[in-house]
Structure formats: C-alpha cells, structure tokens
Image (spheres, grey):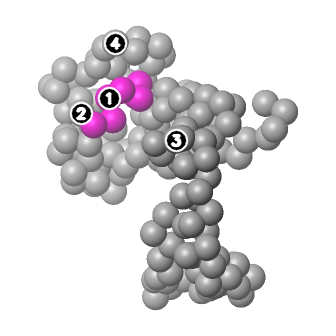
Amino acid sequence: RKFQARLFSDNEEPIAEVQEVENLLNSFKTKLAAALARCRIKHDALSIYHILPETVRNQELRASTLPLYAWINTCKISPEDVYYSLNKKGYNKVNSVLHIDEKVYAVDQHCYDVLIFPSHLKNDLLNTDLFKDYKLIFQVNIYFHCGSQ
C-alpha cells in the first residue's frame, strides 16, 4: 500500500513492459489509495484482508499450514552436522512431518540436502544458529492458483 518505486540491484536488468506497468501504477497511486479506502468504508472492513473473497482467504490459511522446506548449505556444513545440531536443540528426525505438535523434521526423499519442518516451527528455527549463520536456508515457494482449484 505504500506504492514505492522498486529499486534495482546492480546485476538486475529492468524489463521494459514491467517498468511501464510500474510507472502507470505509480502515477495513479493517490487514486488507487483513495479507491481502496472507499472500498474498505463501503464494506465496513478493518483491513484489506476482510474484503478478500473467502476462497482467497482460505488459500492463505492453507498456505500457512504447508510444511517448510529448508536447504542445507553444504558449503558451510555437512548434513550430519545439521542433524546433530538439530538433535541437540530437541528436534527429532522422523519419516514424515505429520507430527505437527512436536519439534520434528524429515529429510526429503529425493534431495538429501533438503529438510522438511512443520510450519509452526518457523520462528523457533529462525532463532537457531543454523539459520542465523545461513547453514540452513528456507526455500521460498511461489504457488500459482487456478480458479478451478
């Protein structure tokens, strides 16, 4: 909602079509903000979230319960050392992360350097040295939803 111009890094080349859309959106930022405010007032909504269709809200809820995937940075640490460190912090290695109330993790069946954690452990994991030192890195998942789902 801040409608700020995007900054490019040194190695990133702007795409002309994307930049044109960004410029058009930026030129209408006041009108967009006013239209959003009118919509919130019309629907008596405290936030944008309350205006979203129920299907979109359900998708967000579903996404927040998906397991977390983390890559082991094998340039900095071996998988065995990660398992040992997690074990010291009270995490147990299991075959599946269906144990959602416990401190557990599983190793991906296809990539030995990918670990799977229940979603509720994210904040706890981010406070570990493994993540602070970039020895474990969360994978960012981007999902495209179809209207027929």
Between the residue at mark 1 and the residue at mark 2, the CA separation in whole angstroms equals 5 Å
Local secondary structure at mark 3: loop
Q: Amino acid type of disc 2?
A: Asp
Instruction: Pick whichever of labels 3 and 1 is earlier in the sequence.
Output: 3
Q: Report the Cα–Cα distance between label 2 and label 4.
A: 13 Å
Q: Magenta part of the protein: which range? A: 117-123
Gap between marks 2 and 3 measured at Cα:
33 Å
Marking on residue 124: 2
- Mark found first going from the N terminus, 2 or 3: 3
Q: Comparing marks 3 and 1, which lies closer to the viewer?
A: 3
Q: What amino acid is at disc 4?
A: Asp
> On the image, numbered disc 1 is attached to which residue?
121
Q: Residue furthest right?
A: 148
Q: Earlier in the sequence, mark 3 or mark 4?
A: 3
Q: What x and y, as percent, mark residue 136?
A: 33, 46
The answer to whether residue 118 is magenta is: yes
What residue is shown with label 4?
A: 101
